[in-house]
Image: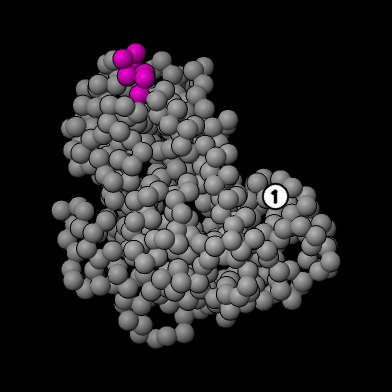
Amino acid sequence: MAFCTTIPCPGNYDRCAAALSAKDTFLYLNILFIHRNFPGQFRHLVSHFASSADNTVVSICQSRAPGIWDQQFATVYKSVYEPHSKTIKNCHSCLTRVENNVSNGQGVARCLFDLGNKGFKPDLVFAHIGWGEALYFKDVFPDVPLIGHCGSCYHGDEADVGFDPESSTTVDERMRIRTWNMAQLVSLAAIDAGVSPTRWQRDLYPPEFQQKIRVIHEGINTETVKPNKDQRLTLLNGTTLTKDMEVVTYAAQGLGPHRGFHVFVKAAEELCRRRPRCHIVITSGEKTRYNKELNGPSYCEKLLKEAAIDHDRVHFMGIVPYEIHLRILRVSSAHIYLTSPFVLSRSMMEAMAVQCVIIGSATPPVEEVIEDGRNGLLCNFFSSQQIADRVDQVLDHPLRMRHLGEEARRNIIEHYNVKDELAEYQKLWQRLLTKIP
């Protein structure tokens, strides 16, 4: 059975316990965030609301959420759920993910009832709708405004499906992928407003729902994520990298075809051959994301083992702390970002804010932000040769290419600055709280 438990806020449990024990404590806004990987895309929003002692901020998440013990969110009360165990035997393959979504939704609903019994009723709720967690929110708090994060709507015959000509998709697989949207569409009907980080992501949703969805990026803190020409980075093998060296970077949450890792590895082979002084730094979890794992060695392990690369100059860092991630970007001469038509990664925007020269795939999510020759360089997703050529172009003419990084940072400040994005969010939630149409 699903269960709901609570985890004390590190260093501030007494305040949270007291807040949830008396209804008359709530004199100001009660904010609830629902995200299995809390804080996820809500990091800046959570910090905004939690920065005021007048607000009570609560999260519902799963037990492995990185924000549970993060001291930055010490004042956030955490309610942890586990999904329902499966109840259907021999579930149809098209419905497996839908059943998981329902299990998540039921787990969250139990947390909502538990919080309500303790005297907590939210004034405003933010929830990621991709995993079913918002399915039953309105059954518990029907009159509370619910803002849904709308990351991606699955398509059986466009976007990332069928993008790679080497990966064929059967009719049954396309039907299964389309069916994944069932729980998300129910959630779309329930939310009072939706938010998508980019226009392209919003436009993946059915037209009848798009008018409900605002385009607001989570934002980049450009006061923290900024260049440092004096940055130095010492690797585990003793190598020290600086901004005046040839450093190529690649970052992703996981390594797989969706983020073009197979193409990147071939480009890395070519760069090792062409440029004997070039260092390549890869930061990512070893497991794939958005793709099936291989039997035996991981996708990353298999590719790196087979690749003809200089392992003294190709550095696989794994998952690194955020500050190390920023240090790596600050010494980067060229940052390669590849993605199929899928959710745009925050790491690319952070690389732009740090003033990296971006070499990005000419795919719709990237093209919404990067204009070739103005604030970055675009290349064919499948062409490792073109990627290597673009890197040569940057490394051979660093002064001539510097303006691309400068313009990239300027674009982030003007269009994706966290202060401006929070202001857009505020317009949205104030409209909902005051019930303005």
- On the image, which quarter does residue 96 sit in? bottom left
Q: Does the magenta segment cover residue 401?
A: yes
As drawn, 377 above or below 347: above
As drawn, 399 above or below 321: above
Q: Does the magenta segment cover residue 33?
A: no
Name the spot of residue 166 as percent of width and height, x first. Answer: 16, 53
Quarter of the C terminus within the rendering: bottom right
- Location of mark 1 (residue): 50
- Tell me which residue sits at (50%, 72%) in the image: 190
Range covered by the magenta-colored residues: 398-404
Q: Nearer the viewer, residue 118 or 253?
A: 118
- Tell me which residue sits at (31%, 27%) in the image: 374
Q: Is residue 97 left or right of residue 46?
A: left
Q: Nearer the viewer, residue 158 or 97?
A: 158
**What amino acid is labelled 1 in the image?**
Ala
From this viewpoint, is residue 192 visible? Answer: yes
**Residue density around tag 1, few if under 14, some if 14–19, many if 20 or more, within 10 Å:** many
Total tally of numbered discs in the picture: 1
Name the spot of residue 14 as percent of width and height, x first. Answer: 83, 58
Q: Is residue 378 left or right of residue 427?
A: left
SS under mark 1: helix
Name the spot of residue 46 as percent of width and height, x first. Answer: 63, 51
- Tell me which residue sits at (67%, 76%) in the image: 113
- Tell me which residue sits at (67%, 50%) in the image: 49
Q: Name the main secondary structure of what is drawn in magenta.
A: helix
- On the image, which quarter does residue 295 sit in? bottom left
- On the image, which quarter does residue 94 sit in? bottom left
Name the spot of residue 7 as percent of width and height, x first. Answer: 70, 62
Q: Is residue 411 left or right of residue 59?
A: left
Quarter of the N terminus within the rendering: bottom right
From this viewpoint, is residue 239 visible? Answer: no
